[in-house]
Structure formats: C-alpha cells, structure tokens
Image: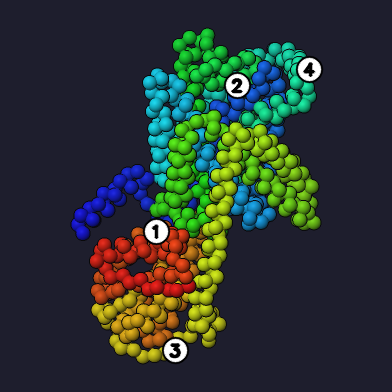
Amino acid sequence: MDNGTEKISIFAKIKRLLIGKAHNPYDSHIFKNLSLVAFFAWVGLGADGLSSSAYGPQEAFMALGGHIYLSIFIAIASAITIIVISTSYSQIIELFPNGGGGYLVATKLLSPGFGMISGCALLIDYVLTITVSVASGSDAIFSFLPLAFQPFKLEFAVFVVVALIIINLRGAKESVTMLIPIFMVFVITHAFVIIYAIGSNIANFGPFIEATKMDVSAAKSEIGILGMLFVLLRAYSMGAGTYTGIEAVSNAMPILREPKVKTAKRAMQYMAYSLMFTVVGLMLAFLIFRVQPQEGKTLNAMLLESISGGWGPVGYIFLLVTLISEAALLFVAAQTGFLGGPGVLANMALDKWFPTRFTMLSDRFVNKNGILIMGISALLMMVFTKGSVTLLVVLYSINVFITFTLSQLGMVRHWWETRSHLKDWKKKITINGVGLVLTTFILISMVVIKFHEGGWVTLIVTGALITFAVFIKRHYYKTAKLLHRLNSLVNAINIGADKDGEPKIVPNPSSEFDPSAKTAVILVNGFNGLGLHTLFGVIRLFGGVFKNFIFVQIGIIDSGNFKGVEELEKLEMQVNNDIDRYVNFMRSEGYHCDGISVIGTDVINELDKITPKLLEKFPNVVFFGGQLVFPQDTYMTRWLHNYTVFAMQRRFYSQGIPFVLLPIRV
C-alpha cells in the first residue's frame, strides 16, 4: 500500500506541476478569476479569424488567376460578409445571454434534431480549427529551417497540439493570458504593413480604378459574364475559412465576464473590425504590389519582402518578426477549438446526444474530457492528413456554414413568430434574413465547388458523428423509460407524505446508538428509485445485521450548473434535501441514521476526503452502491453507465475497504 501511495503522490505532484492546483468552488472570486473580459475574449477567440489571413486572402487572390484586379470585389464581398455575420450573431448573443452557439440556437428555435446536426458540424469544425491552425503554423516555422528538418514537421505539429492540451487543462484565462504578447505583435506588425502599403500608394487610387475596369472588360471578353462570376465565386469560396471564428463568442458565453452580453458584443466588435481590416487590407496590398506566388513562400512573405526589401537590416528583422508572429498566432488560433469545442460537447451531452461524462469539470473547473477529446481528435486528424494544409483548408470551411445557416434560419423563424410582441421585428428579421441568404449561398457554393477536392470527406465524417449522436440519444431514451419503473418506489414511499413532500416520521423506539456496531454506508445520487432499491436491497439481504445507516451523496459540479454562485447554492440545497429525505425515512423506521453531502467535481476524490473521517467514527463500515443491470449487457451499457460505481469499487478495494455492489435490474 505504501508503494501505491507513493505512486499516487508522484502522479499528483506531476499533475499539479502541469495544470496547477485545484480551485475551490466556494471561493467567491472563482467565477471572476476564470472568466474573460472583452479584450481577453478577443485574444482567445478572435485569433482564429485573424490567423486565417495567413491563408484565406492568399487562396482567394490566387484563385483569380491572371485577373488580379477582380480581388477588389472579393475584398468588398468579404467585408460585407463579416459585417452581416457579426451583426446577426450580436442578435443571437442578446437572445441567448447564457450561451447562444449554433447548437443551442438551432435546438431551441428549430428542433432538437436540427440542433444536433448543427452541433456535430460545429464540433468537426472546431477539431479542424485546431488541426489546420497548428499545421499552418508548423509550415510557417519550418519554412525558415533547412530542408533537412522537413521530416520532423509532423512530429513538431503533434508536440504543439499536446502542449496546447496541457495549457488548456490549466484553465481558460491562464491559457489566453500566456498568448497575449504573440497576439499583439501580430496585430501591430500586420496593421503597420497594411497601413504602409495603402498609405504609400494613395496617390495611385485613380489608376487602380481604371485598371480594375479594364480587367473586368478583359474577363468578360475572355470567359464571358457567367465565367467571370464563376471565377469570382470560386475565389470567394476559397477564402471562406476566414469567417469561421465569428461564431466563437456566442459559443463561449459561459466563460465571459459579467455582464456577459455587453462583454460578448464588445468582443464581437473587436473581432469583426480587426478581421475586416486585415482581410481587406491584405488583399488590397497584394494588388497594389502585384504580388505573385513563389515556391516555398506565402503571398504574405512576398508582400513583406516587397515592402521591407530596401530597409536593410531593419527590414530583415521586421520581416522575421512579422512572419514569426504570424506563425505563432496560428497556434493561438487553435484556442478557438479548445475554448468553444468542449462547451458545445458539454451542452450536447447534457441533452443526452453524447455520453454524460462529457459534462464533467475537473478540479481546475475546465471541461477536462472535452479538452481531451478535442485534442486527441485533432492529433488523429493531423496524423491522418499528414499535416497537409491544402487538404485541411478544404475540409475546414464547409461545416461552419452549416451551423451559420441553421442559426440564421432559426433566428428568422423566431422573429417571425414573435412579430406581434416586437416593435422592431422587421429590422431584426431583415438582419438575420440577409444572413440566411448569404450563408446558404456560401454553403451551397462550397459544397459544389469543393466536393471533389476533398469536401466529401467532411460530409462523411460529419454524417458519421450525427449517426453516433442519434444512437447515443436512443440509448439514453430507452434507459430513461427503464429507470422510470424504478422511480415508482419513490411514489410508494411518498404516500402519506406531509404538505412539504417529506415522509411522515413515525415514532419507533430503538436501542441505544452504538458507533462501533455494523454500519452501512450507502452511496446515492439523489432521492430516486436507484438509491431506494439499493437501500432495500441491503435490508433484504442482510436483515438486522446493520444497526446504523449513513447516506452519502456527492453533488457534481458540471457544465450545467457551473454558472455562478447561485447555481452552486441550488445544487448544494438539492443535495442536502435528497439526503434529508433518506435520513428522515430511515429514522422513522427506527434506525440510527445520518447523512453526508458535499459538492465537488469528482466523486472519487470527494469520497477519498470523507472516508477517513467515516472510518474513524464508524470502524465497522461496509460501503454499498447500486449497479444497473440491463436486459442486454453490452459494451455500450458498460461505457455509458456504472463507470463511476466501478471506479469507486476499485479505489476502495485497493485500500482494503469492503465495498458491495448490489445489482439493480432495469
């Protein structure tokens, strides 16, 4: 046992070193300390959109072929798209102040089925956000190194993803704070490049207009109006990955500082203005300097060389700092996946589309399972695609527009149904209506244009995740129907209950209390059929062996109730009420009974804390837990149920403490 204790101690020290000390849920400052103000939200969530300037404007510009002056229209279309999407999502933020991502909007305003589709699409997109950001950053870094280092690029990308997983396990604010310098260097250097490029050529504005007119005429004569429109559409769709970070603020509402709506809308404005400035500015700069692609270099690198080429050593240093900050920001952009993805996964798990364990928080109050699943999925995608940015970009930009379209459709439906109660409903429905038309058009265009380029892979993976979600939902639905039969015992006990719903206490004198007598410690998760069947199973199997009964319930802090001190107080009150009902019932039957209730993030850890005190007061204890037994025992039933009780049994057995599992048939 000493060796085991030593291993646990070493593991605990390593865990604390990597992700920090546990937080105290009763700390009155915990929610403020973990939440993000608008500036931090802009850094953590806006990096996705800004970092796409490393490949979005470039892909759109190159797709125009020789008709580079048509890029002015792409820049204008990009600015309009950003304005429309950000404005429509500001309305979503107002309507859903506790979190209005694509999943919740589609679920509440359309149907749970549409919400599930939107959520699955968004999850895949968040995984690809992590993957493409890290892969692009790795490409940028290895472009400075000798070719001999190229074979290690994939390993480096994998290492970066693992490092980001560890950073995020420490908590949202800490992960963002560490990345602020990188973000600000990128913003300052790229803003300077854009302002210098446009400002130094402002006198040539007239000739650019004339050149654009000539390019439009040439395109019409060469490929016709329809051909020119197709070229514009393809170029526009190739840069569509630029818009994928806009929805991140509405998804991440739970981690924003109060007042959440004001903070979120301000962060959205920061994101929209900075993204619009960067995308439009870079495309105009490409045009002004007539940047041409060169093997082994990005258009951004060619632009910087054109601008700083005559500045001597200072120009080279500026070039190096700017490109390194660009590469580093791509790593920062992966934060969008780690901040938004686990939240969507937790919300879907609360609605039983995914295993409920994905709602659990760690002692750092982050969605540990969600962060791990997003990180591991990104690692698998990185290995599967071998870090190919070309393939990842194609996969990347389709799914988010599925979410965009469903969200806009839900908002349009909402404004129409509530028009009789709103004075400005026409304005609101117009904003989301324009957003619906725009996002639907982009979605259809990208699916058609990118389908044979690899887009079909995204659709298959998303379809597989949707199928899995439907399967999980059906399983939980069937289980709920089976568990409903167990709860009939609760109704039977409540017969004759008093006006407050508590069982009447019938006086029944018993022998003197003896703490050294046999004591049954029954672990429960609420006053329900499972707990009552476990209790009566103990009495039925062991008769009068046990003189004392202790009921223990651990209230779990998960993503559903970790929304403020008031929610935790409600959880604590509910847990105490459940325990009191067990205690009152057993005392009315003449047993010596007591209850213990605590709240925390991990059942096993909380039990470890209270067990020594129990053993000290009651030396002859036996722990009992109920195990659900299904008509057909499958891997799925074992994975989705009973994992907590089996983990408790293993922990108690390792410490030499008797723990009995009582089968409860459902």
Residues at marks 3 and 2, CA–CA distance in whole angstroms: 81 Å
581 vs 130, nearest the viewer: 130
Circle 2: residue type: Ile
Residues at marks 3 and 1, CA–CA distance in whole angstroms: 36 Å
Residue under label 3, please give it: 506
> Which badge, 2 or 4, comes first in the chain's sequence?
2
Residues at marks 1 and 4, CA–CA distance in whole angstroms: 69 Å
- Assess whether mark 2 and mark 3 are in contact (beta carbons under 8 angstroms): no
| Quarter occupied by the N terminus | bottom left
> Which badge, 3 or 2, comes first in the chain's sequence?
2
Residue positioned 80% across, 56% down in the render: 420
Element under label 4? helix
Can you say whether 483 is above or below 200 in the image?
A: below
Judge the density around disc 4: few (<14), some (14-19), many (≥20) Cα neighbours within 10 Å.
few
Q: Nearer the viewer, mark 2 or mark 1?
A: 1
Judge the density around disc 1: few (<14), some (14-19), many (≥20) Cα neighbours within 10 Å.
some
Q: Nearer the viewer, mark 4 or mark 3?
A: 4
Residue under label 4, please give it: 221
The x and y percentages for residue 368 are 43, 50
- Assess whether mark 4 and mark 2 are in contact (beta carbons under 8 angstroms): no
Circle 3: residue type: Val
Element under label 3? loop
Residue under label 1, please give it: 602
Circle 1: residue type: Asp
- Residue 184 showing in the rendered view: no
The x and y percentages for residue 224 are 78, 22
Element under label 2? helix
Residue under label 2, please give it: 194
205 vs 247, nearest the viewer: 247
The x and y percentages for residue 447 are 65, 38
Residue positioned 30% across, 77% down in the render: 519
